[in-house]
Amino acid sequence: MRWIWIRGLVREKGHWYQLPERFHERFPDAEVQFLDLPGNGARFREKTPVSVPLMARSLSDEFRRLRWSSPDGEPTYLLAMSLGAMVAYEWLIRRPTDFDGAVLTNTSFRGLSPMLKRIRPQNLPPMLKAAAVSDLVQRERQILAITSNRTDVHEEAAEVYAGFARERPVARENLLRQVLAGARYRIPDEKPSVPLLVLVSRKDSLVDPQCSRDLQRYVSASFAEHPWGNHDLALDDPQWMVDRIADWLERAPSVADFQ
């Protein structure tokens, strides 16, 4: 099987941290391609579009240029988090035959959930303040204090993430454009025509977990809730994510059955 993974706000493929390793231990034959949003990671020199549909179009264009080692006809899935999951959802609507299913993690949608739940107001100013800190390790410490409950790995992760920021810095303008795009994006009336798994962290301090519950009910998706993880669930408990994905793949209907 083949997978596309998409991270969220000002995050890139390196911020999956240990999840790729755990995933490949469970699925050694799976092929994973990591796509960065425009303005992040390998695409840090680009200007981020101010709309989620334009981000989805950009990633779907990149998807069509990928060279897969696995043969055509292999099932292909999406894994996405936060803003990346909004982009993934739009992609599933606009290109319904690209994927056989998707896993959407700790996300929210205008039209389903109120703005004060989509981004907890007490944490937006600290996030924007952290983005302005010049010491990159300190910046990452402050971001992790908001987005992760695994304090035992914060220092190591902050050092690693600061390295990404040195090599591939995200422009402050792109941060603001990503925040604006996510805030403006309204969930389409049309629903994806493939099986979905919604994952949520009960202790998410950035986005109210009720937003993912709202999404699950709206699309009648499979659902799993982590009891103590924060917004960056890939950092907090990668093994739990892998196990829930494995459970879903065993139980999920085929695309044909779903339709």
Image: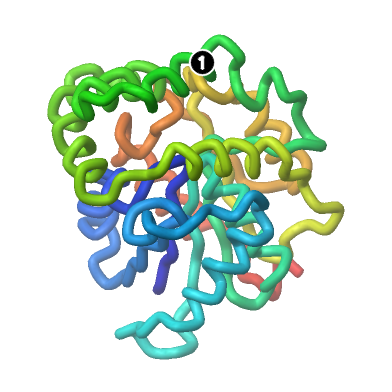
Residue 205 rendering spot, x and y as whole percentages:
49, 17
- Which corner quadrant holds the C terminus? bottom right
Residue at 64 percent across and 63 percent down: it is 91
Left-right relation of 230 to 206: left
Residue count near mark 1 (Cα–Cα under 10 Å), binned few <14, some 14–19, many ≥20: few
In the picture, residue 34 is in which quadrant? bottom left
Residue 87 rendering spot, x and y as whole percentages:
60, 54
Residue at 42 percent across and 66 percent down: it is 3
- Which kind of residue does numbered mark 1 sit on? Pro
Left-right relation of 162 to 125: left
Residue 161 rendering spot, x and y as whole percentages:
23, 38
Of residues 101 and 143, the one nearer the viewer is 143
Residue projecting furthest to the bottom: 72
Q: Is residue 114 above or below residue 171?
A: above
Residue 224 rendering spot, x and y as whole percentages:
53, 36
Of residues 108 and 223, the one nearer the viewer is 108
Residue at 62 percent across and 68 percent down: it is 57
Residue projecting furthest to the top: 122
Residue projecting furthest to the right: 189
In the picture, residue 29 is in which quadrant? bottom left
Q: Is residue 9 above or below residue 103?
A: above
Colouring rule applied to residues: rainbow
Of residues 43 and 172, the one nearer the viewer is 172
- Residue for badge 1: 125
